[in-house]
Image (spheres, grey):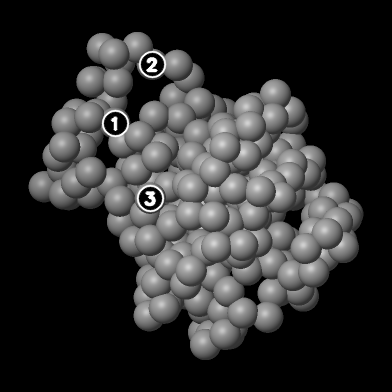
Amino acid sequence: MDFKNKVVLVTGASSGIGRATAIAFAKEGAKVIINFRSDSNGAKEALEKCNKHSKDNIVLQADVSDVNDVSEMLDKIKKQFGSLDILVNNAGIFDESDSPTNIEAFDNIYKNNFLSSVIVTKYVLEIMKEGRIVNVSSIHGRLGHGRPTAIAYSAFKAAFENYTKNLAKEVAPKILVNAIAPGRVNTPQWGSPDKKEQEELGRAHLIKRMIQPEEIADSIVFLAKSDVICGEVLTVDGGMSLVTLG
C-alpha cells in the first residue's frame, strides 16, 4: 500500500509508540489523525512534527473506552475525510495495582486495553471500505506472563491477539488486520528511566537494550504496507521471548 494521501487514525498518539507511529506515517505522506485522551500538549507536539512531513493532519480528543466519544470522533473523521484507510489501535494503560484479587484493576485494564480497541474498530469498519488495521499488543500476551503486576495486562493482550486473528477472518480480503507484540519499549509506561535504568531493563532482551518507539513504529508501517500479511502477530521484542523461555 502506498500511503500518499491515505488517512490514518492512531489512537493514544500523544506519546510513546503512538506518537512515533503518527510521525512515521506522516513521513510516508499520509494524512494523520492524532487521537489523545488527556495529554493535549503531547498531541500538539505530535501534530507539529507530523506537519513537517505531510498536510491535513489533525488532532482529535476522545476517550476510546467511551462509546459516545468514539462515535463522535468517527463522525468528525467522516465529515472531514470521507473515509479511513488505516487504523492503529495503540491506546492502552498499565495499572500498577493489577493483581489476581483486584477486580477494579481488571475492569480498568479490560476497558482500556481491550474493549477500547473493539469499540474503535466497530465504528471504523462503518467507514473503512478497504484498508489496514494494526493492533498494538505486547510480548507478555504471547508469553503468558509478564511483570509481577501484570496478570490482567498479559491476559487482555492475549485476548487482543485472538481478537486480531478472528477479526482478520471476518474482514479480509478488503481489510487486512495484523498485530504487533513489542518487548520493553522506552515509553512513559516505564517513567523516565535514566541510562543505567534503561540498561537494566534492556537486559531482558538479547539485544541488551530497550527498544525505541520509532523502531516499533517502523514495524507498524511495515505491516500496514504489506499486501499479503494478514492475521499475523509480529513479535518485535529484541529477543526477549528467547531470553525468558531459555
- Give the residue pinned by disc 3: 218
Residues under numbered marks 3 and 1 in contact, where contact means CB atoms less than 8 Å apart: no
Label 3 CA crowd tier, 10 Å (few <14, some 14–19, many 20+): some
**In the image, is 71 to the left or to the right of 130?**
right
Going from N to C along the chain, the mark reached first, 3 or 2, is 2
Q: CA distance from mark 3 to mark 2?
A: 23 Å
**In the image, is 147 to the left or to the right of 29?**
left
Residues under numbered marks 1 and 2 in contact, where contact means CB atoms less than 8 Å apart: yes
Q: Position of residue 6 (x, y in %)?
A: 61, 64
Residue at left offset 31%, top offset 56%: 235
Q: Position of residue 83 (x, y in %)?
A: 74, 70
**In the image, is 242 to the left or to the right of 228?**
left
Three-letter code for the amino acid on which mark 2 is drawn: Pro
In the rendered view, tell whether residue 146 sits above or below residue 75: above
Q: CA distance from mark 3 to mark 1?
A: 16 Å
Determine if residue 192 is in view: yes
Q: Quadrant of residue 85?
A: bottom right
- Give the residue pinned by disc 1: 210
Determine if residue 156 is in view: no
- Give the residue pinned by disc 2: 193
Q: Secondary structure at mark 3?
A: helix
Q: Nearer the viewer, mark 3 or mark 2?
A: 3
Q: Nearer the viewer, mark 3 or mark 1?
A: 3
Residue at left offset 65%, top offset 36%: 47
Q: Quadrant of residue 121?
A: bottom right
